[in-house]
Amino acid sequence: MSAIRIDGKGLAARLKAQVRAEAESMRRKPGLAVILVGEDPASRVYVTSKRRDCEECGFYSEEYALPAASAQKELLDLVAKLNGREDIDGILVQLPLPRGLDEREVLLAIDPGKDVDCFHPYNVGQLTIGTPVFQPCTPGGVMEMLREYGIDPAEKRCVVLGRSNIVGKPMALLLLHANGTVAVCHSKTPDLEELAASADILVSAVGRTGLVTADMVKEGAVVIDVAMNRNMEGKLCGDVCFEEVSQKASYITPVPGGVGPMTRAMLMKNTLAAAKLHQRIR
Ligand code: NAP
């Protein structure tokens, strides 16, 4: 049996249309500021796509491109200025920052009410105790996909491959809050294959092409591939061997067209949420 492909692209388009409809009914357009430091080509692509998403959702957006040699203070001053702007609801600093800049200090400087990436320790804390202000974009997008396809993590064994602060850890928390029973694997996990094969819901966020083979997947499992790798031909692919795993899984996300578009849509949803928050307060 071949798995049902989870259509992240289609769902993201519907989500953005809902966001746009809500944004149009607000007295002021939601505003997002994106800061890019340096010339990393992948980061440039992400920033450009965020600008396009803002246009699609009817948001106001600003982009700041700083040279790689920028001083920490320059970046902190810019964040402070944006924190004080009433027309900016969300501030996003594109990561990774060039060497020499202190990422942690920059993320701490963002007003938690404008931290639409959900990276500030205040928001991570709120997420941990189950009262998130914003949904972390990538794991939040995965949860939206599960909901859309009627997949309830409750009473399911969930295995997350990867424990980064951006994907693995918040993914595990969201699944736990949805009453899943969660195991998190990383590079020092000795029995990763066995654990993966026990999962009803398997989420892979490692960044290793070909890591998840069919023998690591339980018959009928839901397989979510977060990774965005480049294969030998330079083509975008995930961690999961899509064709063979599709023969065993019940649902599977493709790469591209799965988690990626949902991450972008969730950023728009968070910016809208921030704008609602600010318009109530101000
Ligand atoms: P990361 O910070 O490099 O984390 C990778 C995680 O995988 C780490 O926890 C690492 O373990 C673990 N790992 C590495 N090799 C392993 C192995 N052989 N077996 C088991 N675990 C292993 O990466 P990330 O930022 O979380 O991103 C992960 C992937 O998701 C990347 O492909 C990235 O491009 C993609 N991504 C996609 C989206 C999207 O929107 N679709 C968003 C963000 C990231 P240790 O902690 O022990 O080192």
Image: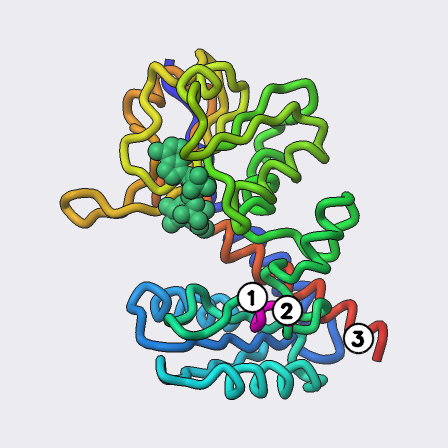
Question: Height in image: 5 above or below 125?
Answer: above
Q: Which mark is residue 279?
A: 3
In the displayed image of the protein, which residue is found farthest to the left? 233
Give how far across and how far down residue 13 sits, in percent. Answer: 50, 53
**Helix, strand or loop status at disc 2:** helix
Q: What secondary structure is the stretch in magenta mostly built from?
A: helix
Picture quarter with the N terminus: top left
Disc 2 target residue: 108
- Report the span colored magenta: 104-108
Disc 1 target residue: 104
Q: In front here: 195 or 243?
A: 195
Quarter of the rendering containing residue 27: bottom right
Q: Nearer the viewer, mark 3 or mark 2?
A: 2
N-terminal label among 3 and 1: 1
Left of 9 or right of it: where is 279? right
Q: In front here: 12 or 197?
A: 197
Q: Residue at x 45, y 27 (%)?
A: 189
Count residues near mark 1 (Cα–Cα under 10 Å), then give few for <14, some for 14-19, many for 20+: few
Q: Residue at x 45, y 74 (%)?
A: 101
Count residues near mark 2 (Cα–Cα under 10 Å), then give few for <14, some for 14-19, many for 20+: some
The three-letter code of the residue at mark 3 reads Gln
Q: Are marks 1 and 2 in contact (CB under 8 Å)?
A: yes
